[in-house]
Amino acid sequence: MLYNVRQIESTLRQRGYKITPQRRAIVRAITGCREHLTPAEIYGRVRREHPGIGLVTVYRTLETLAGLGLICETHAGGSCRSYLVRRPAGHHHHLICSDCGTVIDFTDCDLAGLERRLAREKRFRISGHLLEFVGQCRTCREAAGI
Amino acid sequence: MLYNVRQIESTLRQRGYKITPQRRAIVRAITGCREHLTPAEIYGRVRREHPGIGLVTVYRTLETLAGLGLICETHAGGSCRSYLVRRPAGHHHHLICSDCGTVIDFTDCDLAGLERRLAREKRFRISGHLLEFVGQCRTCREAAGI
DNA sequence: TGCCAGATGAAAATGATTATCGTTTAGCAG
DNA sequence: CTGCTAAACGATAATCATTTTCATCTGGCA
Ligand SMILES: [Mn+2]
Ligand SMILES: [Mn+2]
Ligand SMILES: [Zn+2]
Ligand SMILES: [Zn+2]
């Protein structure tokens, strides 16, 4: 369902990128987490196994992986940029709690028809989509006493 | 369809915010544009009519307006943060060009069924949604020679 | 094994956003 | 109309994320 370490390293190799311990560590950190991670968070995790790695390398590797479509770059509030392993199809769906920030992934949507229509009307070549519902999760709703 | 200057100023007044010339100018700049504007762009526009305004004031006012739900804050590639006048209902739909950053608004979607199902299954109280299609706009596709 | 393009990391530069703080002013009471 | 005061403003500095630069290192191949 999501890309795994083997697939990602294989793609890197195929495209002529070298497999370095740093890249391995970064890929492991991302695939080992189902949530979105900021570059700084990834740096923190990678450093535990691989002290001495540079934050710059993290940024560079994330850019490479996102360019290859292997991970998904998301921009949202707060530290703004974050990354998640990508599922082969180019779409993402989230339920976001506006109180605690929890992000829940859901898998199904039916936007193909809308996508085709928009591509035609607006002359866009659409490569992916992001669908996010914002609200209050069960826990936060109960905590708020509603 | 979208909030206008009068509605925005009225809301500010109701909530006890003062109507200053700076806020007026910022509100005018945003409502006078259908596209997303970054804080820096808004600053540039406001400065033409109101030299001497501080960039800090732009940031503060944008935060206030977004907090009141009068404008919509979006995060995307590039300069990352941008703002758009909001439509009263709590949803937004964008077509974003990943090359040049152009954002096109579209109005219709049919997510009510999905929203109800998710609310039930995930126990969320959903208050709004964001649907973004990412791709390449006509201009950029042609510039790329495809 | 040796080579070298590509990869790395330290350090500095840049750019966006936020915090501080003394000054100004919108809105209201008198 | 004044005068008052909490709110808002703007200059400046601080912070934080990201990018650039450049000297050094190394993965993968001959
Ligand atoms: Mn989808
Ligand atoms: Mn909608
Ligand atoms: Zn929550
Ligand atoms: Zn474009």
Image (cartoon, coloured by chain):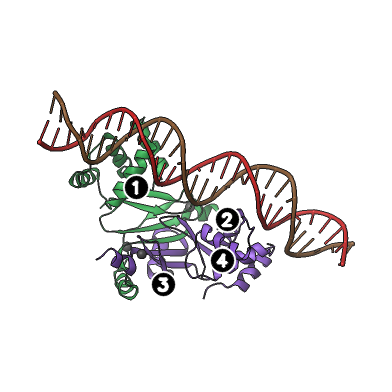
Chain colours: A green, B purple, C brown, D red
Quarter of the image where the C terminus of chain A is located:
bottom right
Q: How many marks?
A: 4
Residue on which the image places disc 3: B106
Q: x and y percent of residue A7 in the render?
A: 21, 46
Residue on which the image places disc 4: B70
Disc 2 with disc 3 on a shared chain: yes
Q: x and y percent of residue A95 in the render?
A: 41, 57
Residue on which the image places disc 2: B59
User: What type is the residue that disc 4 sits on?
Assistant: Leu
User: What type is the residue that disc 1 sits on?
Assistant: Arg
User: What type is the residue that disc 3 sits on?
Assistant: Phe
Ligand 2: quadrant of the figure: bottom left
**Quadrant hosting residue B130:** bottom left
Q: Are marks 2 and 1 in contact (CB under 8 Å)?
A: no
| Chain for disc number 2 | B
Disc 3 with disc 1 on a shared chain: no
Q: Residues within 10 Å of mark 3 (few under 14, many from 20)?
A: some
Nearest to viewer (mark 2 / mark 1): 2
